[in-house]
Image: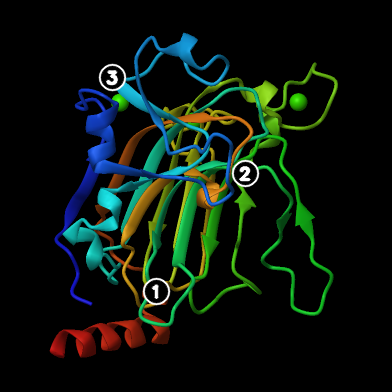
C-alpha cells in the first residue's frame, strides 16, 4: 500500500479540547463489549487538579488535560482519518506509537493505548496487527516456549505490559504471537528493606510512564520509560527502563485504528490516565540483517500494490 507522509501523524495532548463533547468529536467513544451496568462509554477528559473526581486513580499533576479511562474505548476519528487508511511501515520508515499512562499503586487494571487494523476485507471477522501498550493483570504465556512443550506462564507484580497479536510471520526465537507480555524490570528497583525480592508497584510508586512501540516491516520494538524521564531508573543512565525486540512481521493491511481504553475493549476494575499519544513515522537506517529475504518480499509486495 502507498505509504502515508513522513513525520508526525497524530500528536494528541488533549489540552485543546474545550470540554468532554469536543474531546468525543475526535475520539469517538464506544462501549465495552463486556456489558457493564450502566454501560461505560470511553474516557473522561480531566483538567489538571481534577484528582478529587476519581479518587486513587488520578495524578496530582496533569500536563494541561488528560483522559481518565477505565472501561469502554475511544477511537481516533472513529478510525476514519485518511492518514490511517494507508498506515503501514516501510523498510526505511517504521511506525512509532508512544503514550504516557499514569498508574497509581493498584495493580488490578487492564487499560491500554493501541493501534490495530479494525475492519478487514470482506469475510474477515477478526481485527489484525494488534499493538497494545499499558496495563494488564493476568498470566502471560512466554511466546518463545517451543511448540509441543508445556507453556511457561509469567506473572508481573507491576502490570506494565504490551501486546503484539494477530501479526504475520514469526522470526527469531518466537514460537507464537506475543500476546499480552510484561516488561521486564531491573531487580535493583526492588527496595532492599521491603521484605520481599520482587519489583512491585509499591517499589516504583505511582507516576506517569511512557510506553512506545516501533513497528517495522519485520520487527516490533517495545519500550517502557518509567517516570518518562529518559533515564533508566535502576542504573541512572540515559535510556529507558525496559526494552524488547521481536522479529515479527505485520500483515499487509493498514494500521487504521488508533484507540485507548479497557485493554482490547474489555472492562477494568480500576482506571488509569492517558496523555501525549503520538503516532509517527520514524526514519531508520536498517542494519544489514534487516535487509532479509522477508523484507525484500515485503518491498516487492508494496511495489506490486503501487502498480495496481
Ligand atoms: Ca495533556
Ligand atoms: Ca519489593
Ligand atoms: Ca525512566
Please name the residue shown 55% across and 76% down the image.
171
Quarter occupied by residue 118: bottom left
User: Tag 2, which secondary structure?
Assistant: loop
Asked if labels 3 and 1 touch by Cβ distance under 8 angstroms, the answer is no
Give the residue number, with chain letter if any, for mark 2.
136
Q: Which of the two discs, 1 and 3, sits closer to the camera?
A: 3
Residue in the foreground of this view, choosing between 217 and 193:
217
Please name the residue shown 16% across and 84% down the image.
306
Q: Which mark is residue 290?
A: 1
Disc 2 packing (10 Å; few <14; some 14–19; many ≥20): many
Lower sequence index among marks 2 and 3:
3
Is the CB–ligand 1 distance for label 3 below 8 Å? yes
Quarter occupied by residue 257: bottom left
Give the residue number, with chain letter if any, for mark 3.
64
User: Tag 3, which secondary structure?
Assistant: loop
Asked if labels 3 and 2 touch by Cβ distance under 8 angstroms, the answer is no
Query: Is 191 rendered above or below residue 228?
Result: above
Quarter of the C terminus within the rendering: bottom left
- Asked if residue 13 shows in the view, the reply is no
Quadrant of ligand 2 in image = top right
Q: Is residue 144 left or right of residue 114?
A: right
Location of residue 304 in the rendering, given as x and y in whole percent from the top left corner? 22, 90
Amino acid at each position: 500500500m502507498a505509504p502515508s507522509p513522513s513525520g508526525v501523524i497524530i500528536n494528541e495532548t488533549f489540552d485543546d479540547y474545550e470540554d468532554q463533547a469536543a474531546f468525543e468529536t475526535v475520539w469517538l467513544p464506544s462501549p465495552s463489549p463486556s456489558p457493564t451496568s450502566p454501560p461505560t462509554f470511553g474516557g473522561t477528559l480531566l483538567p489538571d487538579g481534577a484528582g478529587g473526581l476519581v479518587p486513587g486513580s488520578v495524578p496530582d499533576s496533569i500536563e494541561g488535560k488528560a483522559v481518565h479511562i477505565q472501561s469502554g474505548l475511544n477511537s481516533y476519528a472513529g478510525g476514519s482519518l485518511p492518514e490511517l487508511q494507508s498506515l503501514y511501515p516501510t523498510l526505511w520508515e517504521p511506525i512509532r506509537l508512544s503514550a504516557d499512562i499514569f498508574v497509581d499503586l493498584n495493580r488490578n487494571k487492564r487499560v491500554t493505548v493501541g493501534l490495530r487494523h479494525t475492519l478487514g476485507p470482506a469475510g474477515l471477522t477478526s481485527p489484525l496487527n494488534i499493538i497494545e501498550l499499558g496495563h494488564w493483570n493476568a498470566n502471560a504465556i512466554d511466546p518463545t516456549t517451543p511448540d509441543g512443550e508445556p507453556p511457561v506462564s509469567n506473572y508481573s507484580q507491576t502490570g506494565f505490559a504490551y501486546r503484539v497479536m494477530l501479526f504475520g510471520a514469526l522470526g527469531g526465537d518466537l514460537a507464537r504471537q506475543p500476546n499480552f507480555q510484561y516488561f521486564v524490570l531491573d531487580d535493583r528497583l526492588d527496595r532492599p528493606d521491603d521484605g520481599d525480592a520482587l519489583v512491585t508497584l509499591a517499589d516504583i510508586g505511582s507516576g506517569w510512564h511512557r510506553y512506545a512501540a516501533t513497528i517495522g516491516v519485520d520487527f516490533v520494538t517495545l519500550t517502557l520509560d518509567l517516570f518518562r524521564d529518559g533515564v533508566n531508573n535502576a542504573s541512572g543512565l540515559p535510556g529507558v527502563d525496559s526494552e524488547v525486540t521481536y522479529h515479527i512481521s505485520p500483515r499487509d493491511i493498514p494500521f487504521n485504528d488508533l484507540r485507548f481504553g479497557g485493554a482490547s475493549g474489555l472492562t477494568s476494575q480500576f482506571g488509569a490516565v492517558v496523555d501525549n499519544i503520538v503516532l509517527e513515522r520514524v526514519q531508520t537506517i536498517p542494519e544489514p540483517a534487516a535487509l532479509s529475504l522477508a523484507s525484500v518480499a515485503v518491498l516487492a509486495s508494496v511495489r506490486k500494490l503501487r502498480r495496481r
